[in-house]
């Protein structure tokens, strides 16, 4: 397993060891002991799978009081995966970072708590699976408008397919710090 540090603290690209032969391939997508050695100590409690068609854009999502670390992988197809740092005291607050994840490159992206997350599908379709370190709490969901000009994400598509909910998210500048990343969970 190869672990690649990114420019944002805690954000990691994981390249698993892949065993290939004439039958196909095999690799571990997750092993707690190896991830723990790489600095990913979370206990993941929920797995999610999404299927999306070309030009679908999902995001930018986060939870406020129940922040989720995520381990994201495109099982089929290709996605342009994006994170935005929403940790108010971080030196990279409001900055974005991206990586292409695909069934071909087999990379995983570890996203620590304190980031908004989104992706768009650049292939005909994509299956994306991701582990979460906390359960989904619909009442705690937050979001940032995917096209926030202050953030300036350079999405690789012109006219994405977006849900009404994702279209209605506010700009990052409209969110007070208490509506962003809150590392202390409520009782």
Image (cartoon, helix red, strand yellow):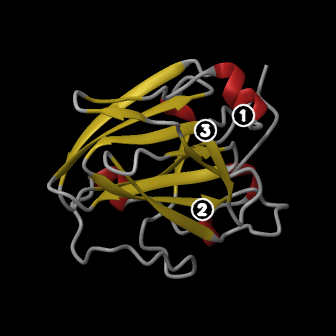
Asked where in the image residue 93 lies, by quadrant, the reply is bottom right
Give the percent coordinates (x, y) of residue 61: 49, 49
User: Mark 3 — residue?
Assistant: 1
The residue that appears at 79% across and 19% down in the rendered structure is 187
Q: CA distance from mark 2 to mark 3?
A: 26 Å
Q: Please name whichever residue, 28 or 70, is drawn nearer the observer in this view of the structure.
A: 28
In the image, 101: left or right of 69? left
Image quadrant for the N terminus? top right
The residue that appears at 48% across and 62% down in the rendered structure is 99
Tell us which disc is closer to us: 2 or 3: 3
- Other-residue count near label 2 (Cα within 10 Å), few / some / many at <14 / 14–19 / ≥20: many
Give the mark, 3 or 1, whose residue is nearer the N terminus: 3
Give the mark, 2 or 3, whose residue is nearer the N terminus: 3
The residue that appears at 66% across and 37% down in the rendered structure is 67
User: Mark 2 — residue?
Assistant: 84
Mark 2 residue element: strand
């Amino acid at each position: 397993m190869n672990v690649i540090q990114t420019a944002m603290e805690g954000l990691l690209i994981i390249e698993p060891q892949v065993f290939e032969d004439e039958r196909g391939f095999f690799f571990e997508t997750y092993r707690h002991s190896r991830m723990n050695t790489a600095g990913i100590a979370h206990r993941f409690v929920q797995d999610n799978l999404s299927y999306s068609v070309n030009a679908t854009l999902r995001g930018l999502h986060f939870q406020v009081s129940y922040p989720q670390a995520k381990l994201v992988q495109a099982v089929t197809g290709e996605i342009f995966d994006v994170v935005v740092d929403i940790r108010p005291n971080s030196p990279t607050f409001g900055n974005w970072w991206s990586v292409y994840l695909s069934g071909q490159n087999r990379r995983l992206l570890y996203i620590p708590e304190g980031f908004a997350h989104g992706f768009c599908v650049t292939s005909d379709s994509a299956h994306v699976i991701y582990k979460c370190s906390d359960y989904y709490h619909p009442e705690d969901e937050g979001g940032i408008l995917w096209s926030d000009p202050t953030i300036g994400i350079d999405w690789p598509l012109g006219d994405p397919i977006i849900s009404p909910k994702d279209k209605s998210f506010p700009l990052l500048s409209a969110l007070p710090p208490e509506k962003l990343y809150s590392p202390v969970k409520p009782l």
